[in-house]
Amino acid sequence: MWIVENIWLILFVLWGIPLTYYRSKFRKMVYQTDSWIINIKPVFIKELRALFGNTFPENRKYLKFRNFYRFYLFIYLVLFGAYFMFGQNSQDLGEKIKIGSTIPVFSLPDQHGEMFDISTVLGKKNLVIYFYPKDDSPGCTKQACSFRDQYEDFVDLDAMVIGISSDDMESHKAFAEKHQLNFTLLSDEDGAVRDLFGVPKSFLGLIEGRTTYVVNKDGKVVYIFNSQLQAEKHITEALQALKEL
């Protein structure tokens, strides 16, 4: 059911709807004005001090609303984190490729500028194909370096690791050289392969998704892990899935 599958997103959005009103009321209180213009003025220091400090210690109305606003923001951040941590981890988020699916045949250039055809390894190796948002971003770097550090564990399980993002070949090459990556990176600049797999985007569709597919030697997907924030968990999940083959 759509509501159940997206409950964290729904709660996040619904709780956030009144946030504009509460923030406006708090800013007017802090800057001591009734003008709506304060809502669009780029002034924040006094507001932050009033939120985390005690700007008007004798003003009971301010103290009461400040505490309420703190609590409201805390719940909003909890829902925000829950949406990322749990709302995007389902193994069935409407992807075109699901557990039991045969992966599509595709060719993409690697970090060395050579064309890599997935059909050349199908049937010969287990595959760990992971889609990630951006070269050299904090989460993607942690994820890539974790794959690098545990690469021998994947080799022992007769698996090949393949990373795919929309970055170009030059970006992949620099990324691989900087972090001494020992596996294949493929450049999917137009997002065609990402679309073939149906990799879901995260955070209201604004960020390219981070999804890992574990594929057996028959070319069948045996496990899918999808999480934007738990970048390093993709490695442990993939290894566990390979061990269970």
Image: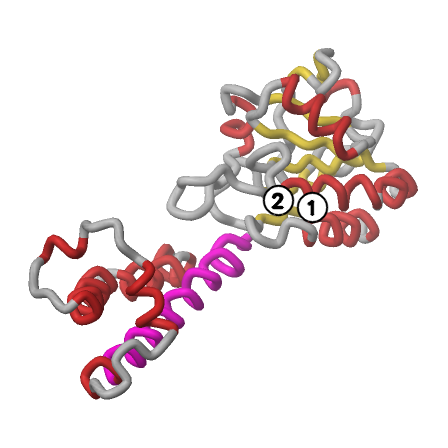
Q: Mark 1 points at which residue?
A: 142
In whole angstroms, how far apart are the C-alphas of marks 1 and 2? 6 Å
In the depicted structure, whether residue 116 falls above or below residue 27 = above
Residue 150 in picture, x, y percent from top left = 84, 45
Q: Residue at x 20, y 50 (%)?
A: 41
Residue 18: in sight, yes or no? no
- Looking at the picture, tell me which residue is in the foreground, 39 or 180: 39
Residue 164 in picture, x, y percent from top left = 63, 30
- Is 74 magenta? The answer is yes
Residue 235: in sight, yes or no? yes
Q: Residue at x 50, y 28 (%)?
A: 195
Q: Main secondary structure of the magenta part?
A: helix
Drawn side of residue 176 relative to residue 29, left or right: right
Rendering quarter of residue 174: top right
Type of the residue with mark 2: Pro
In the depicted structure, whether residue 117 falls above or below residue 70 = above
Type of the residue with mark 1: Lys
Rendering quarter of residue 211: top right
- Is 75 magenta? The answer is yes
Drawn side of residue 59 relative to residue 3, left or right: left
Q: Do the residues labelled 1 and 2 touch (CB within 8 Å)?
A: yes
Give the residue at the far top of this rendering.
114
Residue 138 in picture, x, y percent from top left = 62, 44
Q: Mark 2 points at which residue?
A: 138
In the depicted structure, whether residue 110 falls above or below residue 31 = above
The magenta region covers: 64-90
